Amino acid sequence: MKNGLRELRAERQWSQGDLAERLGVSRQTINAIETEKYDPSLPLAFKISFLFKLPLERIFVPEADVKGTHRRGHA
C-alpha cells in the first residue's frame, strides 16, 4: 500500500520519533510504514488519519489504485 506519511510528517517538521510518540508506536514502526514494508493496522491507520485531520484515502492508497488497474465501482 502506498502512503504519504513521510510527506505529511515532513510538512509539520516532525521526526519519525515525534510522530511515533504522538501515535504511541515505535520509531521503527513509523519507518516501516513510510518505506512501505508494513501496512498499519486499521486502528493505527485511523489514529494517523485523525492526527493529520485527513480521510484515510488521502493518506493510504492501495497499490492497484496507484498503478491505475483498479477504479471505483469496477472490480
Image (tube, helix red, strand yellow):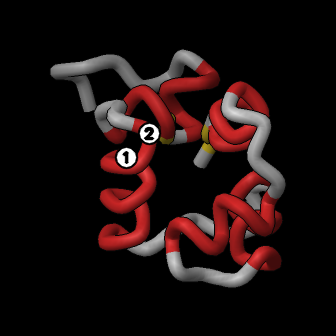
Looking at numbered disc 1 in the image, what kind of residue is underneath it?
Answer: Ser
The part of the image, by quadrant, that contains residue 75 is top left
Q: Residues within 10 Å of mark 2 (few under 14, many from 20)?
A: some
The structure residue drawn at horizontal position 59% and vertical position 48%, both measured from the top left corner, is 1
The structure residue drawn at horizontal position 44% and vertical position 39%, both measured from the top left corner, is 52
Residue receiving disc 2: 52
Q: Are marks 1 and 2 in contact (CB under 8 Å)?
A: yes
- Look at the picture and state if 45 lies above or below 42: above
Residue 36, how many percent across, how many down? Answer: 74, 55
Mark 1 lies on a secondary structure that is: helix
Judged left or right of residue 12, residue 39 is left
- Look at the picture and state if 57 lies above or below 24: above
- Numbered marks: total: 2
The structure residue drawn at horizontal position 81% and vertical position 78%, both measured from the top left corner, is 28
Residue receiving disc 1: 49
How far apart are the two marked residues, 1 and 2, measured between alpha carbons?
5 Å
Mark 2 lies on a secondary structure that is: helix
